[in-house]
Amino acid sequence: MDNKLKAYVDNLFKDAPATAKAYEVKEEILQNLKDKYNDLIAEGKSKEEAYKIALESIGDLSELFAELEKGIGHDDSRQQKYLALKAVIAMVFVLAAVPLVMALSFKNVLMNVMIAVILIAIGIILAIYNNANKPGYTQKSIQTNRMAEIERKKSIRKSVSGFLWLITLIMYFIVSFQTHAWHLTWLMFLLAAAIECILNIWLGQAKK
Amino acid sequence: MLYYVPCKAIYSMKGGIRLIIASDLIRGNTDTIILASLMKKDSYGYEINKNISTKTDGKYEFKEATLYTAFKRLEEAGFITSYWGEQNVTARRRYYSITQRGKEEYLRLLADWKNAKNMIEKLIDTGVMENGQ
């Protein structure tokens, strides 16, 4: 009977705007109908009767769809955020070229290479983050939203973390061979660990 | 505010055609009723509707469409917020919670209603019922 109710509600929501919000409302209404159906059965109603009463309690959804249509504007802000961050990333990469060019003049080579590597690292981390948050879900992806959200965060964290440690290792060798300050440069790994902690909190993984 | 009541809605009500006026009045106060039911504690759609049904001796409850249109409208206005309840996997419920602004709005709407009720009573009650004729 749950499937029958679901099929009925799915059909009613065919005309609803294809947004996460509309999908959630559909889920809520379906849950209410299931609760109602179960309560009616518990009261001693027959299956057919309970099903009929549950369907009658839905009412005319057109006004609700109109209300949901109003909310769509919110998705635009996400799109804007995505584009803004994309512009920032492009700028970071362009800026990274400046110290590289200066390194070619053989003055402060180490310093300039370091700055360039850091800038490129920041750019790549931001790009990974931004791509994972790309707006434009399809109806299908909303359905697996919760699971996907967790998986998505996991994969961002993994790639960011891997990249962070790689950069740290490269920097460690470059800086150490240039400065011979091996007694100090190992501190970079502590710094990397700290950065990873911050990233984990930022990506909301520290909760679990 | 005028509400168009579809015929189906009228006949599905247990009191039959006599309840049109009550039904209209209730629909006109949907926002107030929802805010009122959230004043005590956070709640979800089915629970709110069930309480309304109990309080009216099973004579009235909101249609899902009416209830959720109101939820979205109230949420948009900042009078309520919502969150997914941490419950068992089989029944995930979205809870609604009244905000400070919502509480202020509720008090305003309640005062409006009392005012209107007094006026209507003065206008339509001629005392016939008490006097017998």
Image (cartoon, coloured by chain):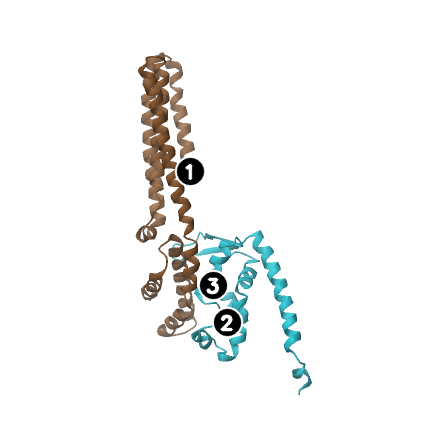
Locate residue A113, reporting x and y percent.
34, 19
The residue identified by callout 2 is: B60
Q: Amino acid at mark 1?
A: Ala
Q: CA distance from mark 1 to mark 3?
A: 37 Å
Report the chain holding disc 1: A
Reply above or below: B91 against A173.
below
The answer as to whether the residues below labels 2 and 1 share one chain is no
Evaluate if marks 3 and 2 touch, with contact meaning CB atoms under 8 Å apart: no
Q: Which numbered mark, 3 or 2, is in the foreground of this view?
A: 3
The answer as to whether the residues below labels 1 and 3 share one chain is no
Q: Which mark is residue A206?
A: 1
Locate residue A38, reporting x and y percent.
40, 67
Q: CA distance from mark 3 to mark 2?
A: 13 Å
Residue located at (48% from left, 62% from top): B47
The residue identified by callout 3 is: B67
Count of all numbered marks drawn on residues in the image: 3
Report the chain holding disc 3: B
Quadrant of the snapshot with the N terminus of chain B: bottom right
Report the chain holding disc 2: B
Q: CA distance from mark 2 to mark 1?
A: 47 Å
Q: Colour of chain B?
A: cyan
Locate residue B27, reporting x and y percent.
51, 68
Chain assigned brown: A
Q: Which numbered mark, 2 or 1, is in the foreground of this view?
A: 2
Callout 2: helix, strand or loop? Answer: loop
Q: Earlier in the sequence, mark 3 or mark 2?
A: 2
Q: Residues within 10 Å of mark 2 (few under 14, many from 20)?
A: many
Answer with the quarter of the image where residue B36 lies: bottom right
Q: Amino acid at mark 2?
A: Tyr
Q: Which numbered mark, 1 or 3, is in the foreground of this view?
A: 3
Answer with the quarter of the image where residue A118 lies: top left
